[in-house]
Amino acid sequence: MHLFHLLPFALLLSTIQLSAQSKSDSIPKYVKVPAGFVMVLRQGDNVFKEIENMATKEQIPSANFTGMGFVSAKFGFFNFKTKEYDPKNFKDVELASMQGSIAWQNGKPSLHCHGVVTGKDFKAYGGHLLEATVGTGSVEIMITVHDKQFQRLMEEPPGANVLNIKE
């Protein structure tokens, strides 16, 4: 088949992709509710980046959040000897539970998040979430806003960032 014959198909595919992209760009990612915000993220969204962007834009002093949906995730187990996370990736899993907090550190939102994911075999894995990208489907997040601004500070011991609740 000649390239000329494939041109109409390529143009149609481009139009469909642009149409889908413009529809998803026009859908809001979060809405304000009495307790804080409800966020719905879609395929390809970076969960942490979206929460951080919303916290900055809405000037959230501090918050807790919960979520569920479909993701590719990176977990980390904190190694107290090296003071770094030992990472493990999980692709295309169900986020059965996610919980975390939003505080501030060095003028930027600082997230601390844990979660549990499951695969098709129904085995569960969990721990400290380092990264999460929405997979096929969506992720729903409830962000409960607090009236005080909290900072996250490095503490020794344990040699990790800790939520500071001093006023």
Image: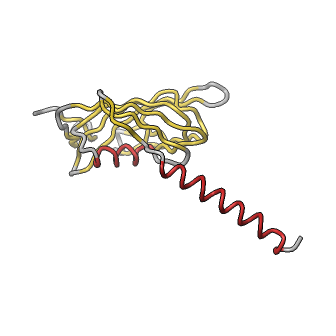
Q: Is residue 114 left or right of residue 22?
A: left
Residue 76 quadrant: top left
153 vs 128, left or right, is left
- Residue visible at 18% across and 35% down? 164
Q: Is residue 89 above or below residue 122?
A: below
> Which quadrant is the N terminus positioned in?
bottom right
Asked which quadrant contains residue 38, the reply is top left
Residue 99, given in percent of the width and then of the height, sits at: 39, 30
Q: Is residue 94 left or right of residue 158?
A: right
The residue closer to the viewer here, 29 or 68, is: 29
> Relative to 120, does residue 111 appear above or below in the rendering?
below
- The image shows residue 73 at horizontal and vertical percentages of 52, 41
Dividing the picture into quadrants, the one containing residue 122 is top right
* x 21%, y 42%: residue: 153
Q: Residue at x 60, y 59 (%)?
A: 18
Instruction: State the image coordinates of residue 77 (x, y, percent, origin top left).
Output: 43, 37
Q: Is residue 16 left or right of residue 102?
A: right
Return the residue nearer the eye: 112 or 83: 112
